[in-house]
């Protein structure tokens, strides 16, 4: 059996640890990096180190930032009475790409998952309540329609409603342009449950 030279084997092994990267993809990436000029490989390595050294959580919303307070929280044009709660920073980015939401965000940095031993105390949930008490009128829960996402949304709703704030959840169901005959049963059930009056 042919073995990689040790440095190449180490690179393949490290790449394989990335989510969604299997052995063949890791090998392909490693060979790609190996073929690049040394300066490009150095820039790639420096970018990884810079991210690890400079990115931290925003002290207000727990989004990733390279400053004390993230760009969204610093924006004076944001509606501070509207707060959208998401699981991860990439969910915040997805919401921002719509150019529809003009409020603030709170990133809980995960979802409640008893199967993975992730409890509410392990997430950035505790930090949410002082923000809500600071003039927020509506909290929108924007979690993936998974068991863990729904568990987290229900947990938060049960804690937020007694504070007298309006709590809503993004709708789940058929995507725009989708066909009923291609939708799975769970999607159709969700679409029916989250229907709205016209």
Image (cartoon, helix red, strand yellow):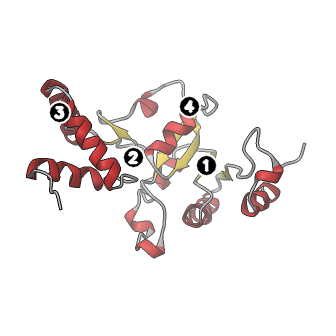
Viewer-proximal residue, 68 or 91?
A: 91
The residue drawn where x is 47% and y is 75% is 114
Viewer-proximal residue, 47 or 111?
A: 47
Q: What residue is disc 1 on?
A: 139
| Disc 2 and disc 1 in contact, CB within 8 angstroms | no
Q: Nearer the viewer, mark 2 or mark 3?
A: 3
Image disc number at residue 46: 3
Residue extending farthest to the right is 198
Q: CA distance from mark 4 to mark 2?
A: 19 Å
Residue extending farthest to the front is 1
Q: Earlier in the sequence, mark 2 or mark 3?
A: 3
Q: Earlier in the sequence, mark 4 or mark 3?
A: 3
The residue drawn where x is 29% and y is 41% is 29
Residue 77 found in image quarter: top right
Q: Residues within 10 Å of mark 4 (few under 14, many from 20)?
A: few
Image disc number at residue 21: none
Quick check: 82 above or below 190? above
Q: Nearer the viewer, mark 4 or mark 2?
A: 4
Q: Residues within 10 Å of mark 3 (few under 14, many from 20)?
A: few
Q: What residue is disc 4 on?
A: 97
Q: Earlier in the sequence, mark 4 or mark 2?
A: 2
Q: CA distance from mark 1 to mark 4?
A: 19 Å
Q: What residue is disc 2 on?
A: 62
Q: SS of the residue at dot 4?
A: helix
Q: Residues within 10 Å of mark 1 (few under 14, many from 20)?
A: many
Viewer-proximal residue, 116 or 33?
A: 33
Q: SS of the residue at dot 3?
A: helix
| Disc 4 and disc 2 in contact, CB within 8 angstroms | no
Q: CA distance from mark 3 to mark 1?
A: 39 Å
In x, y percent, where is residue 186? 73, 63
Q: Nearer the viewer, mark 4 or mark 3?
A: 3
Q: SS of the residue at dot 1?
A: strand
């Amino acid at each position: 059996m042919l073995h990689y030279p040790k440095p190449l084997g180490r690179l393949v092994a490290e790449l394989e640890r990335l989510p969604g990267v299997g052995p063949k993809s890791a090998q392909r990436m490693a060979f790609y990096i190996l073929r690049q000029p040394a300066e490009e490989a150095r820039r790639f390595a420096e970018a990884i180190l810079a991210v690890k050294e400079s990115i931290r959580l925003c002290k207000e919303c727990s989004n990733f930032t390279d400053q004390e307070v993230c760009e969204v929280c610093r924006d004076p044009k944001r509606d501070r009475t509207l707060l959208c709660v998401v699981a991860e920073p990439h969910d915040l980015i997805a919401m921002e790409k719509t150019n529809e939401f003009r409020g603030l965000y709170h990133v809980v940095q995960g979802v409640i998952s008893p199967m993975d031993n992730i409890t509410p105390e392990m997430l950035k949930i505790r930090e949410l309540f002082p923000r809500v008490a600071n003039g927020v009128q509506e909290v929108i829960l924007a979690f993936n329609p998974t068991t863990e996402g729904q568990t987290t949304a229900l947990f938060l709703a049960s804690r937020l409603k007694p504070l007298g704030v309006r709590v809503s959840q993004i709708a789940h169901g058929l995507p725009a342009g989708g066909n009923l005959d291609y939708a799975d049963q769970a999607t159709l059930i969700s679409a029916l449950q989250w229907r709205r009056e016209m």
